[in-house]
Image (spheres, helix red, strand yellow):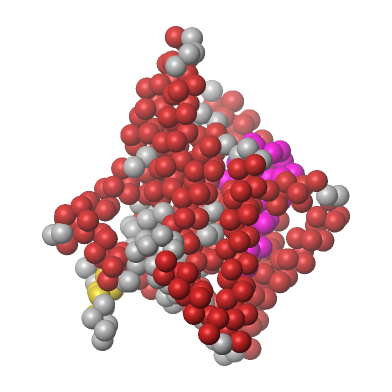
């Protein structure tokens, strides 16, 4: 068994090497562009990556624990209970065993998690469509317009890594691994529910298929059932703990989110936000861009369905997309919230994989340059709220 494991691990790493090296190169280009743009603007690129917006909230949880809140003049209460605990736990662990600060620890965790996420995306796409598509999928995730978030001390990279490997475990029938990783994803972000839904949907479908299987094949049922039971424990455990902490019961977490003006309204508030853009000519262009962006996301999902992606991927991408587009606040964050929806990139990855290597490399290089410039501009401007 030891000899087998030592042979398999290097083989998997070697197979993923082009994707990982390409991903690292693209992200290095993005960080270089950010550093140069920030220097020209008199700002610190490292501060932008590790000490602004949500990264400050995660760092405070890691350093001082839960219980901090900010009361705004309009009466809103921003509580750090809104932030799930896995990232600050890891920041605290790294800071405890190394000389790194909490900010440094958050950056390191996100850096390693982004590589793990790229590998997981490659593994999923490789399993479904082949190695070339896997490489293209990882690189497409690296060149998204807001891909700079993958290098920030945010939880998107950590969550995407856990989600991708959980989905890969589902696709390869490793139910205990899938359930455990879904549990951890549920401790990372509220959208961990998407991973739970994917594990449950695939598990139920697998159970239905296996009803007619030979008795010997049904030995997998206990592991599948245990994996399905494990999957929701992370998200459910934290939500119930917040309810107990606030004294408001199982719905206490919704009250915490309401203090941030966050909620799920089916997309009504977002639709009004887009409609308001058409009250003047300059902003109307932004409204048209938003409509085009939403249309592209919906179209990609429909293509995923037509191409017959595995059920787990369709459920996961569908839930992530619905939660991102139908949230009632922080409209500027929607591109960031869609970062984990990597199955939407698979149709584009398949199309790129069909091109000649030189042509697909040219396309990716061009998009990588544009992404690096946009990420530097965005992070030095409004950035991700």
Q: Position of residue 153 (x, y in %)?
A: 46, 66
Tell me which residue sits at (42%, 42%) in the image: 197
Tell me which residue sits at (54%, 43%) in the image: 314
Q: Position of residue 203 (x, y in %)?
A: 44, 31
- Taking depth in this image into account, of 2 and 317 the one nearest to the observer is 317
| Residue 19 visible in the picture | no
**Is 198 left, or right, of 74 in this rendering?**
right
The residue furthest top is: 215
What segment is highlighted magenta in the picture? 119-145
Relative to 252, residue 332 above or below? below
| Residue 193 visible in the picture | yes
The residue furthest left is: 247
The image quadrant of residue 304 is top right
Relative to 54, residue 169 above or below? above
- Magenta run includes residue 202: no
**Is 318 left, or right, of 143 in this rendering?**
left
Q: Quadrant of the C terminus?
A: bottom left
**Is 121 left, or right, of 79 in this rendering?**
right
The image quadrant of residue 191 is bottom left
Does the magenta stretch mainly form a helix, a strand or a loop? helix
Q: Quadrant of the N terminus?
A: top right
Q: Position of residue 83 (x, y in %)?
A: 34, 63
- Give the number of marks: 0
Q: Position of residue 172 (x, y in %)?
A: 55, 31
The image quadrant of residue 199 is top left
- Magenta run includes residue 131: yes
Tell me which residue sits at (57%, 76%) in the image: 287
């Amino acid at each position: 068994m030891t000899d087998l494991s030592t042979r398999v691990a290097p083989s998997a790493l070697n197979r993923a090497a082009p994707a990982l090296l390409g991903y690292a190169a693209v992200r290095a280009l993005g960080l270089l562009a950010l550093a140069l743009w920030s220097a020209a603007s008199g700002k610190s690129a490292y501060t932008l990556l590790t000490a602004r917006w949500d990264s400050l909230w995660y760092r405070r949880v890691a350093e001082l624990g839960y219980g901090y809140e900010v009361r705004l003049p309009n009466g809103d209460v921003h509580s750090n209970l809104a932030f799930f605990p896995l990232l600050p736990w890891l920041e605290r662990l790294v800071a405890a065993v190394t000389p790194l600060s909490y900010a440094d620890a958050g950056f390191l965790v996100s850096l390693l998690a982004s590589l793990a996420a790229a590998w997981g995306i490659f593994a999923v796409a490789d399993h479904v469509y082949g190695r070339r598509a896997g490489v293209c999928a990882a690189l497409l995730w690296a060149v998204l317009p807001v891909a700079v978030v993958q290098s920030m001390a945010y939880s998107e990279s950590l969550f995407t890594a856990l989600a991708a490997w959980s989905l890969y475990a589902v696709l390869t029938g490793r139910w205990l691994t899938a359930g455990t990783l879904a549990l951890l994803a549920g401790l990372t972000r509220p959208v961990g529910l998407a991973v739970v839904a994917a594990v449950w949907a695939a598990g139920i479908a697998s159970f239905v298929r296996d009803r007619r299987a030979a008795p010997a094949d049904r030995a997998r049922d206990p592991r599948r059932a245990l994996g399905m039971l494990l999957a929701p424990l992370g998200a459910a455990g934290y939500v119930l703990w917040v309810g107990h902490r606030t004294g408001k019961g199982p719905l206490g977490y919704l009250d915490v989110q309401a203090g941030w003006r966050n909620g799920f309204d089916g997309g009504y508030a977002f639709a009004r936000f887009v409609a308001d853009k058409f009250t003047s000519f300059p902003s109307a262009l932004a409204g048209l861009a938003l409509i085009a962006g939403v249309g592209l996301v919906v179209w990609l999902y429909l293509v995923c369905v037509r191409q017959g992606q595995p059920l787990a991927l369709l459920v996961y991408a569908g839930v992530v997309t619905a939660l991102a587009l139908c949230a009632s606040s922080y409209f500027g964050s929607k591109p960031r919230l869609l970062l984990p929806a990597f199955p939407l990139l698979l149709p584009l990855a398949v199309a790129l994989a069909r091109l000649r290597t030189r042509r697909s490399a040219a396309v990716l290089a061009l998009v990588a340059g544009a992404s690096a410039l946009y990420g530097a501009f965005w992070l030095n401007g409004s950035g991700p709220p």
